[in-house]
Image: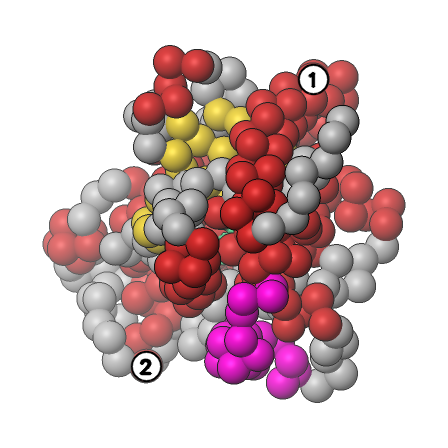
Amino acid sequence: MEELSSQKTILSGIKPTGQLTIGNYIGAMKNFVKLQNDYETLYMVVDLHALTVPQEPKELRHKTLSIIAQYIAVGLDPEKNNLFIQSHVTGHTELAWILGCMTGLGDLSRMTQFKDKSAKPGANVNAGLYTYPILMASDILLYNADFVPVGEDQKQHVELTRDIAMRFNYRYSDTFTIPEPIIPKSGARIMDLQNPMSKMGKSDSGESGRIALIDEPSLVAKRIKSAVTDSGSEIKFSETDEKAGIRNLLTIYANLTEISIAEIELMYEGKGYGDFKKDLADIVVERLSPIKNRHDDLMKNKDYLEAVLKSGAESAQKKAWKMLSKVYRKVGLVQAVR
Ligand code: TYM
């Protein structure tokens, strides 16, 4: 991997808080796969972030491994990418402490994700939920990432990361690369199938509003066919609220087939929502079935997954130690004699 060190670095992460959805796939993972050949890439499962909401320990362990298996199942080659679990690398929380000492409460209070999550009735508003963007900044800056492929909802967190990095560089001299988000033009915010005015979430959408990458094909088809549309019948992309359902389905269709929305509209001229949904159901099933099958096979091969994680963490750890010791030195901590 040494000769790759001059390449730009891509980094991203996914929280193991529920089943990965086609939203995560279209908004983020599809880009992870696309970028793997031309960059140095680090893709992690951010298990420490998941602890900001209560987790059942056994389930958390399972979901974490399942996401690693899904990374591979969607096409990430473990030989080309550093695939690892956040908690396997020392440095994320250490750097987060230092960055936290440079982040204003005002900055954290204006994060829309925190505002949304903490406003939910019965929300468990803990300190971790509030300081979460600092840990995310640390994930990114620890590896000097140039680009961060994410969906629309993470843009504000990457912007805060940029602010923190600039603040640090200004105060202590050039240290961190200022990262840029990579957000897809279409599909950066896939909506809930039953409530197309809100985002399809891993854990906060109702079951029938989301499609998991590893759902059974019959369930996938059923969910598409019962997606909410409107009383019209024309397959047209429109920004109006009334058309939010069909707009979302068109976006999914276009992203899974690489056919442009204009072309899809032409293909369905004179046809109704029923025909369109039936075809889309087939398309989604065809795309997801091999992912599910590969995932299920990989989950039976824990030795292989562990080997992938070991090598991913080893290589990430080297980079993390290097950056952490640089930061410790810059801020004035006495170097440990080891
Ligand atoms: P998370 O786990 O909520 O989501 C993982 C990725 O999927 C994108 N995404 C979506 N894209 C389109 N439509 C949707 N409905 C949809 N739902 C989710 C998210 O934008 C994200 O890219 N804080 C992050 C995880 C994280 C991270 C990082 C990301 C931690 N450290 C460092 C990048 C770099 C999160 O909770 O993503």
Task: Answer left or right for 215 relative to 143.
Answer: right
**What is the total number of numbered labels drawn onto the structure image?**
2
Residue 122 position in % (x across, y down): 76, 83
Residue 298 position in % (x across, y down): 67, 23
Residue 265 position in % (x across, y down): 17, 57
Which portion, as a residue range, is magenta? 100-120
Task: Answer left or right for 13 relative to 175.
Answer: right
The image quadrant of residue 336 is: top right
Query: In the figure, 29 relative to 130: above or below?
Result: above
Question: In the structure shown, which secondary structural element does the residue marked by tag 2 occupy?
Answer: helix
Residue 307's disc number: 1
The residue singled out by tag 2 in the image is: 241
Query: In the figure, 88 relative to 247: above or below?
Result: above
Say which of 287 and 150 sits in front: 150
Query: In the figure, 102 relative to 73: above or below?
Result: below
The image quadrant of residue 269 is: bottom left
Query: What amino acid type is highlighted by mark number 2?
Result: Asp
Task: Answer left or right for 177 relative to 101.
Answer: left
Q: Residue at x 44, y 14 (%)?
A: 2
Say which of 331 and 163 sits in front: 331
